[in-house]
Amino acid sequence: MAMVNVTASAADRIKALLDRDGKLASHGLRMKVVGGGCSGLQYELAFDDSLGDEDQTIEAGGIRVFVDPKSALYLAGSTLDFVDTLQESGFKIENPNASATCGCGQSFGA
């Protein structure tokens, strides 16, 4: 099982955003879990050009995703997707480790 599965639509969107800013070759997407939100933990996504010694790197569709060891405990087996519909637009994380989620989908409990 991969640390994080990245769908083709998520990889395409990440690639487009990095390419737009001229950072495709130098940056990746950092996936992080931090304390906060109404369920106790929340996801944080940001572009990053530094890789920590213990970070895991996932390569998918021409992009890189970085996950630190603490966040890896909560993200193992998750799927990162990008949706763009009339109802919603943005990155979505399906996390099998989440025991509870809030209504907005931005925070979870484990």
Image (tube, grey):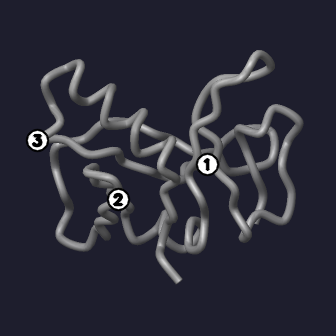
- Mark 2 or 1 closer to N-term? 1
Tell me: residue 26, above or below residue 98: above
Which residue is denoted by mark 3 in the rendering?
26
> Which quadrant is home to the C terminus?
bottom right
Residue at 24% over, 19% down: 20
Please tell me in which quadrant of the rendered image residue 99 appears. Answer: bottom right
- Mark 3 or 1 closer to N-term? 3
Residue at 47% over, 49% down: 8
Q: Secondary structure at mark 2?
A: strand
- Mark 2 or 3 closer to N-term? 3
State the CA–CA distance, disc 3 to disc 1.
Answer: 28 Å
Tell me: residue 11, above or below residue 51: above
Where is residue 88? Give x, y as percent.
73, 23
Where is residue 27? Give x, y as percent.
19, 41
User: Which labelled disc corresponds to residue 60?
Assistant: 2
Eye-nearest disc, 2 or 3: 2
Amino acid carrying label 3: it is Ser
Which residue is denoted by mark 1 in the rendering?
35
